[in-house]
Image (spheres, rainbow, N blue to C red):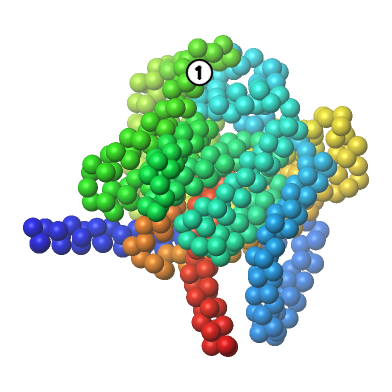
Amino acid sequence: MIKNSKKVINKTNFLYEALFVVAFLLSSFWLFSAIRSENFSLELIYSQNGAYIFILSLIALTVSYLNRDKLKNWLSYVIRFLCNNIVAVFGVMILFQIVTLLFASGLSGYDVYGLYHAAMGDIDSQKWTYLQNYPNNFLLFLFMRIVHSLTLLQILNIIAIDFSIAMSYFTAKRLFDKQTARYSILLFIATLGFSPWFLNTYSDTFVLPFVSLGIFFLTCWSEKSIAPHYRLISLLSAGFFSSIAYYLKPSAIIFVIAYFLISILKLGKFKPFFISFLVFIIGALVFAMPFTLYKNNQNYVHFDKNKVFPMTHFLMLGISKNGMYNGPDVQLTRSAKTAKEKKEVNIRVFKQRLKQLGTLGYTKFLYGKYCKTIHDGTYAWGADGAGKTGFLVTSNLNPSEKLSPFIHSNFGSFLRSFIYTDGNGQGYTNGKNTFFYRFIAQIIYIIMIFGILLSTLKSRYDFKVMWLLLSMIGLMLFLLLFEGGRSRYLIQTLPVFVILAAYGYHSKFGTQNLKSRSKNK
């Protein structure tokens, strides 16, 4: 018995060790790819300001190096100041979002464009094949139809993002400590709060509050110190909000799978795992059952199982030339008449492509796809859409009469030059000054990734860290196997990323700061 238990422990420890190694490798390549991002490549940016920025950057780096001790003290002061004034920083972020909404509101392109017009009644949703092919967007379609206003949708998107940012503080505080929570909310504010992503009313951001609540309530369930009935309510709530997240974006619940996988390894017994999982499922069904019932009896969209794109379609996309959406693959799946035929043709093409690539070729392909998926600190802002349905283009400005004086002002035109994606010649299809946004966003992104890398170096066999790391690994593997190629797909897991990064920084530098302070005393 003792020998068998030791073998189990050794196997479990091996799995734990493997998890940290994989997380370290993924985050290392992630950091390497982000540093090499074209957001830093001035020659690829069609901007008259590129040369000036390069010269100023060289001067700034030189001055920083010569005054590195003073700079270090100044940075420490700035971080402490921000941590002690989080409410004020949060308020400034909201002000930025309101100003951007007033002067730059517009309709995004690609899927958002079609969903919005279908929800507004401009497109006949009964005849529109998009929702029949992608029923996972039906909940978002319903939400848009109820709201029935682009301005209000963007306001609600701001609330969704800001709520998620606030929740990261409370979750990180429960998982680790107050200082980690402060770092977490600051990173979230920097990487998404001060970005224009709230203008893009899609599932990437609308799913965030439900992911955040799912993580928070699973964290509460894990706390043995709270009352049993509160823990039970927390687990039911985790299931409920995770279910909503699933119906908005199925891949968003990878953190749930990671949680229960780590739980069964930690518990080592099936019965307590099964009971907790069953309670979670009951909570999930509270939303899933009535929503499914409504979906099957509504009159907006006629769903046909033979028109739904199966998961095998996204697996086929995942091994296409760029590992991302492409017209020919979509037409191929659509041409298959039945659900069975769709799966068969997808699997056949997947096997053909895999055979053509070979083992070495597929490895190279995955590396290239991984770099393409995770390199962009703007989360692929402007990468989707073209022509009239460009990501954010002047032709799709918000038609609201109330916002018109702001949108059509000179300042509105100036502000949009930093975030709109109107084509202006060779290079990126960016506005005149989008390089500034891309450059700053990339620096913040690298800071976040470096923190995640640090989190793989500390507290081995810590359940909380392993859960978050496995959530990160799970998403990365999903994007490698299935449709990827866009950093936009990382937004759904930002609540995990910022907490990991915050923990990484605090575990590495927080202890050192405490030691240095004690020595000074």
Q: In this view, does 151 lie above or below 118?
A: below
Quadrant of residue 271 within the rendered picture: top left
Choose between 18 and 459: the one closer to the eye.
Answer: 459
Q: In which quarter of the image is residue 69?
A: bottom right
Q: Which quadrant is home to the C terminus?
A: bottom right
The type of residue carrying mark 1 is: Lys
Is residue 55 something that shows in the picture? Answer: yes
x then y, percent, for residue 264? 28, 48
Reply above or below: 91 against 455. above
Indicate the position of residue 7 as horizontal and vertical percent values.
15, 60
Q: Residue at x 31, y 63 (%)?
A: 17
Kindly identify the residue that appears in the image at 26 percent across and 44 percent down.
Answer: 272
Q: Is residue 133 above or below residue 72?
A: above
Locate residue 461 relative to residue 113 in the image: left or right.
left
Whether residue 68 is situated above or below residue 197 in the rendered picture: below
The residue pinned by badge 1 equals: 295
Q: In which quarter of the image is the N terminus?
A: bottom left
Q: Is residue 485 visible?
A: no
Tell me what residue is drawn at x 73 percent, y 71 percent. 57
Judged from the image, the secondary structure of the residue bearing numbered disc 1 is helix
Q: Which is more toward the observer, 168 or 198?
A: 168
Residue shown at the point (49%, 36%) measured from the top left: 241
User: Dot 1: few (<14), some (14–19), or many (≥20) neighbours within 10 Å?
Assistant: some
Horizontal side of residue 323 vs 279, given as left or right: right
